[in-house]
Image: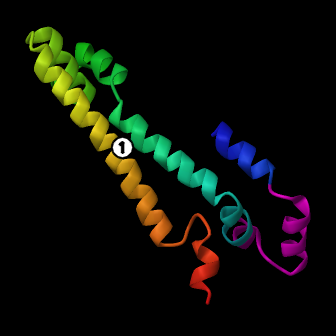
Amino acid sequence: MTILLTSLTSVPREVIEAAKVDGASELSVALRVKLPMVRRTVLFIVVLSIIGSLQLFNEPMILNDIASIGSSYSPNELIYNTAFSFGNEQLAAAQSVVLALITVLATGAFYGIVRRRGLVGGRVARRAR
């Protein structure tokens, strides 16, 4: 939220006021002025969310003591249990490498999709031709 708030406060007031003078509603200003100006920040937050969801560890470990949710609720918990509960460090190391590759590939695929659609980078101007 802090990242998004910082990005929203960097939107020039003149642009927002110009949209309101032109008769745009608050929803229209938000969707057609503010959102395009903070698009890169939103995409950055999505990438951080992808990486963060693949690194989920503490919450399932704590909640497992309260309610039985299973020992392999998240990938990191599965890796932890493989190494320390079952004593198979080699398999846990291999699982860690696979998880790192999945994280890199998911992030790269997301950026590839975003670039192909022209949401980030210099391709927006090229699509207009």
The quadrant the C terminus occupies is bottom right
Q: Residues within 10 Å of mark 1 (few under 14, many from 20)?
A: some
Front position in the image: 42 or 89: 89
Above or below, 60 relative to 128: above
User: Residue 11's quadrant in the figure?
Assistant: bottom right
- The region drawn magenta spans 11-30
Front position in the image: 83 or 62: 83
Q: Amino acid at mark 1?
A: Val
User: Residue 83's quadrant in the figure?
Assistant: top left
Q: Is residue 46 left or right of residue 90?
A: right
**Does the stretch in magenta take in 26?**
yes
- The answer to whether one can see residue 8 in this image is yes
Helix, strand or loop: magenta stretch = helix
Q: Position of residue 108 (x, y in %)?
A: 40, 52
User: Residue 73's quadrant in the figure?
Assistant: top left
On the image, numbered disc 1 is attached to which residue?
Answer: 104
Question: Which residue is pictured at 84% across the width and 66% down the height?
Answer: 16
Question: Which residue is pictured at 33% across the width and 36% down the height?
Answer: 54
Above or below, 93 relative to 125: above
Element under disc 1: helix
Q: Is residue 71 left or right of residue 120?
A: left
